[in-house]
Amino acid sequence: MADTTRITVTLPADQVAELRKLTDNVSGYVAEAVARQLRHQLLGADLMRHQEEYGAFTAEELAEARSRLLGTTDAGGSASAA
């Protein structure tokens, strides 16, 4: 089991009510949301460093990235048959 630390987090009451409708494990749900946000921020920082070193992404590079992320085969955004 991973090391854990107990903390107190203050959330709006309506968010807590919605969380409790979604899960019995609020701590696990919040931990997963925090992990997702951390990955998002780290990826953003990596992308910024890449652009600082190699220059801005080209339109072609962005289209290829979108295609890979969204599972499309062309820049028009149609889904792949795979």
Image (cartoon, rainbow, N blue to C red):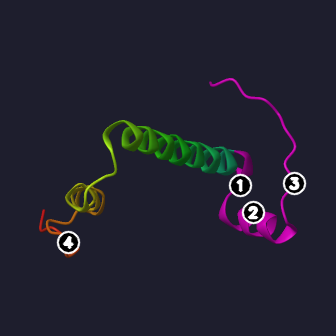
The answer to the question of whether label 2 and label 3 lie on touching residues, with beta carbons closer than 8 A, is no
* Position above or below: 36 against 67: above
Among the two numbered marks 2 and 3 on one chain, the one whose residue lies closer to the N terminus:
3
User: Around disc 4, counting alpha carbons within 10 Å, would you say few (fewer than 14), some (14 to 19), or many (20 or more)?
Assistant: few
The answer to the question of whether label 1 and label 2 lie on touching residues, with beta carbons closer than 8 A, is yes
**The residue stretch that appears in magenta:** 1-27
Type of the residue with mark 4: Ala
User: Around disc 3, counting alpha carbons within 10 Å, would you say few (fewer than 14), some (14 to 19), or many (20 or more)?
Assistant: few
Could you give the CA–CA distance between mark 1 and mark 4, rounded to whole angstroms? 36 Å
> Which residue matches tag 2?
20
Could you give the CA–CA distance between mark 2 and mark 3, rounded to whole angstroms? 15 Å
The answer to the question of whether label 3 and label 4 lie on touching residues, with beta carbons closer than 8 A, is no
Among the two numbered marks 3 and 4 on one chain, the one whose residue lies closer to the N terminus:
3
Type of the residue with mark 2: Arg
> Which residue matches tag 1?
24
Residue drawn at the location 21% of the way across and 57% of the way down: 64
Residue 79, labelled with which disc? 4
Among the two numbered marks 1 and 3 on one chain, the one whose residue lies closer to the N terminus:
3
Residue 10, labelled with which disc? 3
* Foreground residue among 64 and 69: 64
Tell me the element at label 2. Answer: helix
* Quadrant of res 78: bottom left
Residue drawn at the location 80% of the way across and 68% of the way down: 17
On whether residue 24 falls in the magenta region, the answer is yes
Tell me the mark number nearer the camera, choosing from 1 and 3. Answer: 3
Tell me the element at label 4. Answer: loop
